[in-house]
Structure formats: structure tokens, C-alpha cells
Image (cartoon, helix red, strand yellow):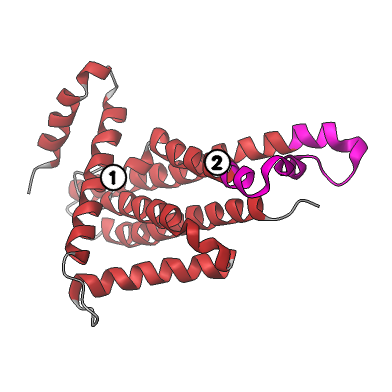
Amino acid sequence: MIHPLLFLEFFRKLLSPLHLNDASADAIAYTWLIIGLLLIVSVLATKALTSIPSGLQNFMEIVVDGIENMIVQTMGEHGRPFFPLIATLALFILVSNLIGLIPGFFPPTANINTTAACAVIVFVSTHVVGIKHHGTHYIKHFMGPIAWLAPLMLVIEVVSHLSRVLSLSLRLFGNMFGHEMVLMSFFFLGIKFFVPIIPLPMMLMGILVSFIQAFVFMLLAMIYIQGSLEEAH
């Protein structure tokens, strides 16, 4: 296994022409690492598909079916076309969160640039879907139910939709960065006082937080897209 410090140093040199700081370079490096891991898992799970799944194929089918069922329950049958987007975001965020529990690794979701990028994807996708589905009538979503209040409602709705990017990115970033700092503090505290069991409860909490944050992000993405598909009133 490649030592994380050697891995980071390699990518820092690779990204040096971009003049990024260490935090941004590390986030990009870990993002590429996670993309590579997900691609490898996808290839291994689908290279020999069988009617009676087993091993990795069986595990991935359970994951895929779980995400698909959640999309259908939240958005209805018309939510199935958005499965690739929702599932990709969910798996990427979950693996990004969990990788921070490995000593020496840092979750890219603890960097505001990564979470903001995911939030922008959701924001753009929401309005592209809305415009594609409703055409020019999509503007009615921003006008409110009363005609003479339309100018004020337009401003309020635009600010509300823009704040979704801030909300999605800061919620995920704040939780993961805060947990990472707490975990590191407890870890070094355990080393200092020779109590290796101290970080274990935080590790278990980290697994729970990782799943919850991935679920919340996925759920909000589904709700936003579902809202853009509804008829304006």
C-alpha cells in the first residue's frame, strides 16, 4: 500500500503548476484517489455479471437497489432517470467521508472546495431539469401565488435558491472538518497518555456521521430536483 504522505507529495508536485495551497492540492489528490477506487470497484463488480450474484456483485447490487428504492420513495417513479446523478454523489460523498477514518488520510469533504463543487452540481442540475421539464413556465416557480407580489417573491426565491449552495456545502464541510479535528485531537491525546482506546468511540461516531451526512446530502438533492419537477402554483 502506498504511504499517504508519498501519495500526497506526488500529487503536490503534479499540481504545482496550478499554484494551489497544500489543502486544495490534498483535496484534489484524495478526490482522484476516490474516483479511481470507485471505478475499480465498479469494474470488478460488473466484469462477470451472473444471474445469481455473489461476492462484490451481490454487495453492490444491495447498495444500488437501496439507493434506487430511496429515490423512488422520495421522488416517485419519475425520479428513476436521476439515479446516476444521485447515486454518484451519494457514493462519492460516503467514500470521501469514510476515507478520513484511515490514519494518515484526510477526507476531501473536509475541504470547502469539494463540498461546494458537489453543491453547485446539485444546484445546476436542479434548474436544468426544471427548465427542461417546464420550459419558460419554470419562471413561475419564482413568482409566488400573488401577481403584484411577483417582483418581491422573485428576489426572495432567487436568494433562497442561491442559499442552497451555501447550505449544502457548509453543512457537509462543517460536520466533516469538525469531526476530523476532534478525531485528531483524541487520537493524539490517546498517544500522549498511552490510552489507545480513547479514539475508538470517535471512530465509531465518525462512521455514523459519514453515513448520515451522505444520506442528508442525497436526500436534499432529491428534494430540490423533485421541487423543480412540480407544477408551480
Q: Whole-Å distance between the Cαs marked 2 and 1?
A: 33 Å
Instruction: Give the class, few, some or many, for how many residues have Cα within 10 Å of label 2's Cα (few <14, many ≥20).
Output: many
**Amino acid of disc 1:** Met
**Amino acid of disc 2:** Phe
State the image coordinates of residue 15 (x, y, percent, origin top left).
Answer: 21, 24
Is residue 137 a member of the stretch shown in magenta? yes
Residue furthest bottom as drawn: 52
The one of 128 and 30 positioned closer to us in this rendering? 128
Q: Is residue 22 left or right of residue 68?
A: left
**In percent of the image, x 56 and y 68: which residue is there?**
77
State the image coordinates of residue 105 (x, y, percent, origin top left).
Answer: 22, 44
Residue furthest right as drawn: 148
Q: Tell me the tag on residue 184.
A: 1
**In percent of the image, x 81 and y 52: which residue is there?**
233
SS at mark 1?
helix
Is residue 209 a member of the stretch shown in magenta? no
Q: Which residue is mark 2?
A: 123
The quarter of the displayed image where residue 26 is located: top left
Q: Quick one: label 2 or label 1, which is nearer the N terminus? A: 2
- Examine the rendered structure and indicate whether residue 50 appears above or below residue 9: below
- Examine the rendered structure and indicate whether residue 197 appears above or below residue 99: below
- Read off the magenta span: 127-156
The one of 145 and 179 positioned closer to us in this rendering? 145
Q: Tell me the tag on residue 155.
A: none
State the image coordinates of residue 10 (x, y, percent, origin top left).
Answer: 12, 30
The quarter of the displayed image where residue 2 is located: top left
